[in-house]
Each structure stands twice: as C-alpha cells, then as structure tokens.
Amino acid sequence: LVMCPDRKLEWFKVHGYTTQQVQDITNIVMKRWETSYKSSEAIVVPPVAQKKSSQFVHRAEHITIHNVDSIQDYLSEPVVSTEVVIHSGGHMQSWTLAEKK
C-alpha cells in the first residue's frame, strides 16, 4: 500500500491508524528500502565559499540532494488520484512517467 502512488501513508491515516502506528510503518518501509532497493547514496553538496557581506546573511552548512530512488522524497510527495494511476496504465507506468518528469 505504501508504494502505491494513490495511497502511500495516507491510506493508513484515513483508516484510523494512530500517528505512532504510521510512524512505525514508515520506519519499516524505509528500512526495507535501504536494505533491498536503494540504488546509491544521497549527494551532500558543501556550501559555496562567499564573502560575509552582512551580519544578517547566513549560509547553510550543506545541501542534501536525494537521488531518484529516495524513499523520503517519494513518501513526502502528495498522493495522486486513482484516476491518474489508471490513466497512466497502472502503478508501474505511473512510476515510470513520474520518473521522467
């Protein structure tokens, strides 16, 4: 269910699962993804060196860019409608189309 783009974690929330239960499910899915499916590490980009021009200008310590197979990114994206999944040709085609965007 979690990997269905039209359900994800929302299905559990709508069907009365507690916040803790949803978090437990999230942890299980993320652990499984990391051990079985993850293709590569996220990229951590160091900040660009710049002159300090103002006491009000602050820079981030680093920026993390998740790869295409980031489960965190996938789960944080909103669910799509079931009609979109059907129109795409099913779940697999929906993922393929989303990956091309």
Image (tube, grey):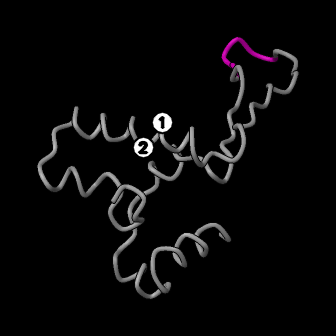
Q: Is residue 57 magenta?
A: yes
Residue ID at (88%, 21%) = 49
Q: In the image as oriented, which residue stretches furthest toward the top?
A: 55
Q: Is residue 92 magenta?
A: no
Whether tag 2 and tag 1 are in contact, CB under 8 A, the answer is yes
Query: What amino acid is found at the position of numbered circle 1 in the picture?
Result: Lys
Rendered image: mark on residue 41? none
Residue ID at (69%, 40%) = 65
Residue 74 lies, with reference to residue 48, above or below; the image says below
Percent coordinates x, y for residue 52 in the rendering:
82, 15
Question: Left of 24 or right of it: where is 15?
Answer: left
Where does the C terminus fall, quadrant-wise?
Answer: bottom right
Image quarter of residue 4: bottom left
Residue ID at (52%, 74%) = 92
**Marks 2 and 1, how far apart in space?**
5 Å
Question: Left of 17 or right of it: where is 23?
Answer: right
Mark 1 sits on what residue? 31
Percent coordinates x, y for residue 55 in the rendering:
70, 11
Where does the N terminus fall, quadrant-wise?
Answer: bottom left
The secondary structure that dominates the magenta segment is: loop
Q: Nearer the viewer, residue 86 or 34?
A: 34
Q: Secondary structure at mark 1?
A: helix
Query: What amino acid is found at the position of numbered circle 2 in the picture?
Result: Val
Question: Left of 92 or right of it: where is 4?
Answer: left
Q: Secondary structure at mark 2?
A: helix
Few, some or many residues within 10 Å of mark 2 (<14, 14–19, 20+): some
Residue 101 lies, with reference to residue 26, above or below; the image says below
Residue ID at (53%, 47%) = 71
Mark 2 sits on what residue? 29
Q: Nearer the viewer, residue 36 or 100?
A: 36
Percent coordinates x, y for residue 42 in the rendering:
70, 37
Q: Which residues are magenta?
A: 53-59
